[in-house]
Amino acid sequence: MSGNIERVLVTGGAGFIGSHLVDRLIDRGAHVICLDNLLTGAMGNVAHLARHPRFEFLQRDVCEPLDLQVDAIYNLACPASPVQYQRDPVRTTKTAVLGALNMLELARRNTCPILQASTSEVYGDPLVHPQDESYSGNVNCTGPRSCYDEGKRCAETLFFDYRRQYGLAVKVARIFNTYGPRMQRDDGRVVSNFITQALVGAPIQLYGNGSQTRSFCYVDDLVEGLLRLMATPEEFTGPVNLGNAAEISISALAERVLSLTGSASPLQNSPLPTDDPRRRMPNLALAEQALGWRAAMPLDKGLMHTIDYFSRQPVA
Ligand code: NAD
Ligand code: UDP
């Protein structure tokens, strides 16, 4: 610590979730070092902090080793949208695995806690519903999603081995689908796609018949969960699910977006991507018990905040 000010590293800090986390940490009085290579993030997400005395930006790749003095690390650097992480799958695996390794080494040198942004994708196309943390998953290790799913699974392995082998204070959050302001318009995920299409009156692209389900968590809720996880006693490592337990089909999500935007966009079906999980919904008992946390934002209200945000963005 320099004086009484905590120095916190956020990798992926210019991304969607990372930039909201950075804001909360700055509000709490931390000195934040935001590391990002801007692959899927944007300087615009942190532009309001550019002159802040407790904000630093490092344009770097997590795959490169790093030496810094820090008191805590949040490791979020990794593309999260299937479209983005499949663009350069080898790089995605490297980011997930080498990024985790480099940040764990940094945490070890600093003897500081480190939190990993893991994912519900470690459950793959789950055969258990809802998914709790003891479920070891149904992941295809050779498919187009594997670079992300297996990369994140290997990162979790590294986190727990650093705990067992070196006694490092690790925290693993399994994040379920999260949405909100600062998703990139061309990110490719369902909420940003549907809102963008609805606002310009373009057809809403439903992959498959839209019967597959997800559970959508608003970004402010998720960030609160990450902060609470980092604040748990050292013995608590997770993994812990963070998300919203309200399951909705993708076709029902499309109807919500059309109704909230007042759009007349037609629905259009296109092929379901390979290995697209059919159902996903978190069991949140552990998050409630260990963190005293549950997602509070109702879907319609969270979607309205996100629609307002996209409506204010200049059209490309
Ligand atoms: P995002 O794509 O908006 O943010 C990822 C950030 O990481 C971007 O700013 C990107 O530029 C940066 N990045 C990517 N590769 C990098 C590298 N090699 N070096 C440095 N920076 C790099 O995605 P997000 O939704 O904000 O996701 C953040 C984290 O949360 C990711 O690790 C993701 O796997 C995890 N997560 C997100 C969700 C979700 O629904 N949003 C769900 C599960 C897990
Ligand atoms: N999806 C869709 N239309 C889109 C984008 C996604 O129907 O424009 C579907 C996708 O096939 C998946 C769900 O919405 O079933 C969530 O996709 P997303 O890429 O947001 O996240 P995932 O949970 O698949 O990682």
Image: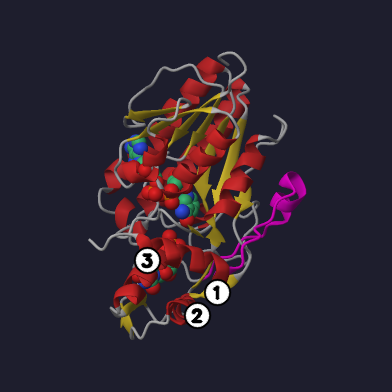
Q: Is residue 241 visible?
A: yes
Marking on residue 156: none
Asked if disc 1 and disc 2 are in contact, CB closer than 8 Å, the reply is: yes
Residue under label 2, please give it: 252
Q: Does the magenta stretch include residue 64?
A: no
Q: Nearer the viewer, residue 289 or 151?
A: 289
Residue under label 3, please give it: 311
Residue under label 1, please give it: 248
- What's the residue type where badge 2 is placed? Ala
Instruction: Please state if 238 lies on the left or on the right of 299 as rendered.
Output: right
Q: Identify the magenta region.
A: 279-299
Q: Please state the horizontal and vertical placement of residue 133, each as a whole percent of the image.
A: 64, 52
Please name which of the two marks, 3 or 1, marks the residue nearer to the observer.
3
N-term-proximal mark, 3 vs 1: 1
- Name the quadrant containing residue 3: top right
N-term-proximal mark, 3 vs 2: 2
**What is the spatial separation of the Cα atoms under label 1 and label 2, in whole angstroms?**
6 Å
Q: Main secondary structure of the magenta part?
A: loop
Q: Please state the horizontal and vertical placement of residue 229, each as a whole percent of the image.
A: 65, 40
Task: For label 2, count other residues whose C-alpha is less than 10 Å away and answer few (under 14), some (14-19) or many (20+).
Answer: few
Please name which of the two marks, 3 or 2, marks the residue nearer to the observer.
3
Q: Can residue 275 be seen in this view?
A: no
Disc 2 is placed on an element classified as helix
Residue at the image point whose x is 57% and y is 47% from the top:
223
Task: For label 3, count other residues whose C-alpha is less than 10 Å away and answer few (under 14), some (14-19) or many (20+).
Answer: some
Task: For label 1, count other residues whose C-alpha is less than 10 Å away and answer few (under 14), some (14-19) or many (20+).
Answer: some
**What is the spatial separation of the Cα atoms under label 3 and label 2, in whole angstroms?**
22 Å
- What's the residue type where badge 3 is placed? Ser
Q: Please state the horizontal and vertical placement of residue 166, each as a whole percent of the image.
A: 59, 21
Residue at the image point whose x is 63% and y is 22% from the top:
167
